[in-house]
Image: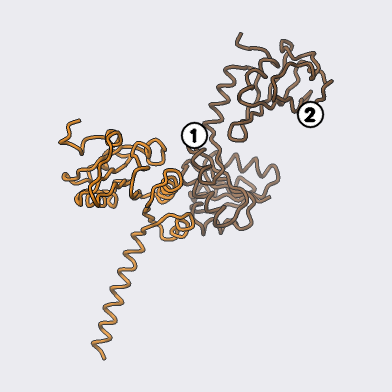
Chain colours: A brown, B orange
Amino acid sequence: MRVLVVGGDRLVYFVSRSLTNRGYAVTIINRDREECTRLARTLDATVVYGDGSMPHVLEEAGAWDADVVLAITPNDEDNLVICQVASVHFEVPRALALVNDPDHEETFRGLGVMAVSPTQILTRLLEQRMTFEDIEQFIPIAEGNINVTEIALDEDSPAVGMNLQDIPLPEGALIAAILRRGRPIIPGGATVMRDRDRLIVITLPDNHEEALKVLVGDSNG
Amino acid sequence: MPKGHPSHSTAEEAAREPRVRREGQLFVVVIGCGRLGSLVANRLSFRDHHVTVVDQRSGAFDALAPEYSGFRLEGDATEFATLREADIGQADVLIIATENDNINLMVGQVARKIFNVQRVIARVSEPRREEVFSELGIETICPAVLVGDEIVESLHRDRSLGRQEDS
């Protein structure tokens, strides 16, 4: 898979590094000549110098053959245009924009661009953590209409020792997977929850809190 | 706010008052009060149109003429709230004249597709970006192209005159 990453600073470095580690072919577009040299030296990636929102620069970076474009510059307007040029002009199948202003997430979607807002993710995660200490990960998907949450059970969790089918989960909440000593299990009705299990739970915003309360108890109480 | 000093009122106050327009009067919002934006805002205001000019640098409004009678709004046009405060949904024309092409392109699309502004004209500084704007349905004016064309045209005019004189 060919990934085109546009942006700079540590964010681009770390994102590109984790992508190359996973075996993706990465091309970086950066508008600082010195940084380009540095990135090219330290990463196993192709580096192109230029303004990634300019069509000729995207073309030079191989936009026609790219599977994904990630626009992660610090400027929301640049990220929008990069994604639009990539998808409208070069027909790149997937383009993802980083947004700093969380309101832009919806605006960009209205303009046909998929956007991620770290501000939004961090705020939601923080809110969740303040309510439940046992949350390991929290990922809202489908415009925030579905939550995927990873929680850790401990000996005090009410669900420990119960069969999946006996756990009084609210309707529409689902334990999708269990990580037991690092091994993934897809649970059935007879699967028993154990101390230190990590559960991947799918909930709707409406039943989210109730579902977590049933599984890990009220950590604030 | 006293009625006699409209130039000191905020756009927000303007939005609250129903906009009564005279025949032929346009409500124009200008984004960016640099050289181009302030020139357009001044001229439209002199022609009695209803103008609101938006810029995030308060010092930018110094470029407006003392006789400018429209509104000034300090704010970042890439923020939804600023556009709403400028009441662009009611505008007949939106002129986007910041020096940043991508901001102009973004604001232009938000205005067209989300606020349904009838006419949006965006300045584009980099001629090679004009194609992108047109692919995304935004009407543009590129000062570099206008000036460039004019120079070539005038040279051409001189030469053809010269040729006529030769023959």
Q: Position of residue A206 (x, y in %)?
A: 61, 23
Rendering coords of residue A12 (x, y %)? 56, 42
Q: Residue at x 54, y 57 (%)?
A: A89
Q: Position of residue A75 (x, y in %)?
A: 46, 42
Q: State the SS at label 1.
A: loop
In the depicted structure, whether residue A160 falls above or below residue B120: above
Judged from the image, the secondary structure of the residue bearing numbered disc 2 is strand
Left or right of B58 in this view: B108 = right
Q: Earlier in the sequence, mark 2 or mark 1?
A: 1
Classify the position of the C terminus of chain A by image quarter. top right
Give residue A184's mark.
Answer: 2
Pick the front one: A199 or B27: B27
* Residue density around tag 1, few if under 14, some if 14–19, many if 20 or more, within 10 Å: some
* Residue plotted at (27% across, 49% down): B26
Farthest residue in the bottom direction? B167
Mark 2 and mark 1: span between their CA atoms?
34 Å
Residue in the foreground of this view, choosing between B6 and A87: B6
- Which disc number belongs to residue B8? none
Quickly name the residue at label 1: A102
Up the image or down, B83 lies above or below B147; here it is above
* Quadrant in the rendering for residue A21: top right
Which image quarter: residue A23? top right
Chain of residue at mark 2: A
Is the same chain shared between marks 2 and 1?
A: yes
Report crowding for label 2: few under 14, some 14 to 19, many 20 or more residues within 10 A (C-alpha): few
Give residue B106's position: percent from left, percent from top: 44, 47
Mark 2 or 1: in front is 1
Left-right relation of B159 to A108 = left
Q: Amino acid at mark 2?
A: Pro
For disc 1, the chain is A
